[in-house]
Amino acid sequence: MFEIIRKTLIIALCLVLSKVLHLQVGIFLVLYGIIIANNCPVNRLPVMLRILAPSFLAAVGASFVNQIFSAHPFIIWTLSVVYFDHIRKKTDTSVKARSAIFPLFNVIFIDTFANSSDFVLVVPDLIRDLLVSIFLASAIAYLVNLLLPIKLKKIQTPVVTLPVSGAERLKILILVGGGLAFLMLNEVTSATFCLVPVITSVMQPTYGHMKKEVEKRIITQVGGCCSAMFLSILFMGTEINVATFFLVSFGLVFTLMKWCECPDPVERSIHNDAVLGILVPFQLYIGKYGNNFGLDLIALRTVELVLALGVVYCVAIMLGKNQLART
């Protein structure tokens, strides 16, 4: 119970601050808070910053590339794909795969927004807000951990070896690189976050694991959006008062973290992903536009997730059949 309260307090404070400060990308403050609360076993600021730094450096690098080659989107895409290949080449374990998700996503995030006519001018603000989110999430976690010292026993997660072959590298280039090309060409900024489950699915060691990962993500991410629709109606108006919104957020996060207390690592992984599936649309859309419930935006995110995961699932089935035919 002590650990649940500690984690809940960190995440709830990040949720409230992300709303109060009106950051362009307030969701990153919540995401970084969840990462630090769940994955940092010591209360040391340098360790927290080291965990979050790669995602920020990837975003800064992508921003420079977009500034230098702003008139040549194809060069931007090509350099991004080279970076994807470099990361996949070095990702030979499940631990490295988890660490690579946010740097990869931040490159996609910056590329998509920098090549959008509506958001190109706010890219410097996005970089600033990413940096602010890293320091705020680390500072909040540090202060909460001083008040409630960490008593978490480090859980040894099994390390799975991932194949690093030409076929695996080509797979991420086609699916993730193709997804980035689609977002850049069509300026579909709302679908940017949909590539996170795509990246995690593509990183799986076999096509069978890819299908299982997609099925899990449909349950957690799409189910999370459906839950967020219900929460948007239930909690509408609470964001007007900071104290009320904090109590509501604390209660919600506490319930979700309590739900994540599972002895089975597979079930715990599903529950943890469902927490992200609920909290991301909760932060992004609920109460963002006055008294609008945000149901249309959550529904759009749900459809985009289904389409993106559906493409990966179909690819996994087709490639899996081809592999069986060859053997």
Image (tube, rainbow, N blue to C red):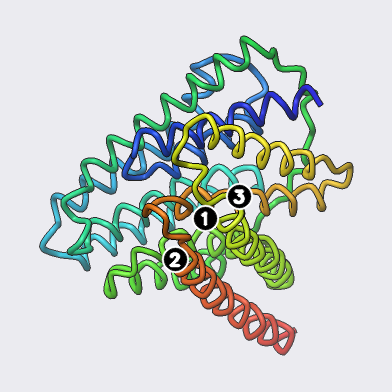
**Is disc 1 in contact with disc 2, using a CB cutoff of under 8 Å?**
yes
Q: Position of residue 309 (x, y in %)?
A: 57, 72
Could you classify mark 2 by the number of other residues whose Cα lies within 10 Å: few (under 14), some (14-19), or many (20 or more)?
some
* Image quarter in which the C terminus is found: bottom right
| Residue topped by disc 3 | 276
Left or right: where does residue 279 sit relative to residue 56? right
Residue drawn at (29%, 43%) of the image: 126
Quadrant position of the N terminus in the picture = top right
Query: How many C-alpha atoms fall within 10 Å of the one at disc 3: few (<14), some, or many (≥20)?
Result: some
Above or below 133: residue 312 = below
Horizontal relation, residue 204 to residue 176: left or right = right
Comparing 306 with 185, the one in front is: 306
Looking at the image, is 107 positioned above or below residue 316?
above
Nearer the camera: disc 1 or disc 3: 1
Q: As shown in the figure, which amino acid type bears the numbered disc 2?
A: Leu
- Residue pointed to by mark 2: 297
Q: Position of residue 111 (x, y in %)?
A: 29, 57
Residue 56 in the figure: left or right of residue 4? left
Q: Which residue is mark 1?
A: 281
State the CA–CA distance, disc 1 to disc 3: 9 Å
Q: Amino acid at mark 1?
A: Pro
Q: Residue at x 74, y 54 (%)?
A: 270
* Precedes in sequence: disc 1 or disc 3: 3
At mark 2, the secondary structure is helix
In the displayed structure, 303 sits above or below 85; it is below
Coordinates of residue 32 in the picture (x, y in percent): 51, 36
Task: Describe the element under mark 3 as helix, strand or loop.
Answer: helix
Q: Residue at x 28, y 48 (%)?
A: 62
Q: Nearer the viewer, residue 67 or 253?
A: 253
Classify residue 12 as left or right of residue 50: right
Q: Earlier in the sequence, mark 1 or mark 2?
A: 1
Q: CA distance from mark 3 to mark 2?
A: 17 Å
